[in-house]
Image (cartoon, helix red, strand yellow):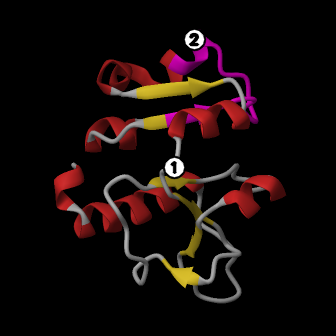
């Protein structure tokens, strides 16, 4: 939430979340950044798809084949991350238009979600500076 607020990037929250996220918890998690955060809550995956239309869905995943630095981002791309523990469900993974990965030093498995999002988002902004 802080990352999106600070960089001026919209954030979509797709329910059900892997944790309780009522308005009180949302405000607590976002702290004083909530007033600077452009976010949309979607009641379901289907609701999210209906509202985002034909925009390209780019999934950050350890199962991705294309390094995030080799991917050609577009200004209207949606970057998606999954849960820390499990990533995204198979149907979401299969729906992604692109799957990108942050190469890591073996045998290490993954970075946390916020760090991964920051890395990929920074590259997308570098490639598409007018999107900020």
* Secondary structure found at label 1: loop
Q: Residue lying furthest bottom in this view?
A: 106
Judged left or right of residue 76, residue 85 is right
Q: Is residue 130 visible?
A: yes
Residue beneath the point at 43% across and 65% down:
120
Mark 2 secondary-structure assignment: helix
The residue located at (34%, 25%) in the rendering is: 33
When asked about the image quadrant of residue 71, the answer is: bottom left
> Given this view, does label 1 or label 2 mark the residue nearer the observer?
1
Magenta region: 12-26
The residue indicated by pointer 1 is: 54
22 lies left or right of 117: right
Residue 27 in magenta? no
Q: Which residue is mark 2?
A: 23
Q: Does residue 88 appear anywhere in the picture?
A: no
Q: Position of residue 102 (x, y in %)?
A: 53, 76
Q: Give the spatial CA distance, label 1 vs label 2.
A: 29 Å
Q: Residue 15's x, y, as percent?
A: 70, 29
Q: Is residue 19 magenta?
A: yes
* Contact (Cβ within 8 Å) of mark 1 with mark 2: no
């Amino acid at each position: 939430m802080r990352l999106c607020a600070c960089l001026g990037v919209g954030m979509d929250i797709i329910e059900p979340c892997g944790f309780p996220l009522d308005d009180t918890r949302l405000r607590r998690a976002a702290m004083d950044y909530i007033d600077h955060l452009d976010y949309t809550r979607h009641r379901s995956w289907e609701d999210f798809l209906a509202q985002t239309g034909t925009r390209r869905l780019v999934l950050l995943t350890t199962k991705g084949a294309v390094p995030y630095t080799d991917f050609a981002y577009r200004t209207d791309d949606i970057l998606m991350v999954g849960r820390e523990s499990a990533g995204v469900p198979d149907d979401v993974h299969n729906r992604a238009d692109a799957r990108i990965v942050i190469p890591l030093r073996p045998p290490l498995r993954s970075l946390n979600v916020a760090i991964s999002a920051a890395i990929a988002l920074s590259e997308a902004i570098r490639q598409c500076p007018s999107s900020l």
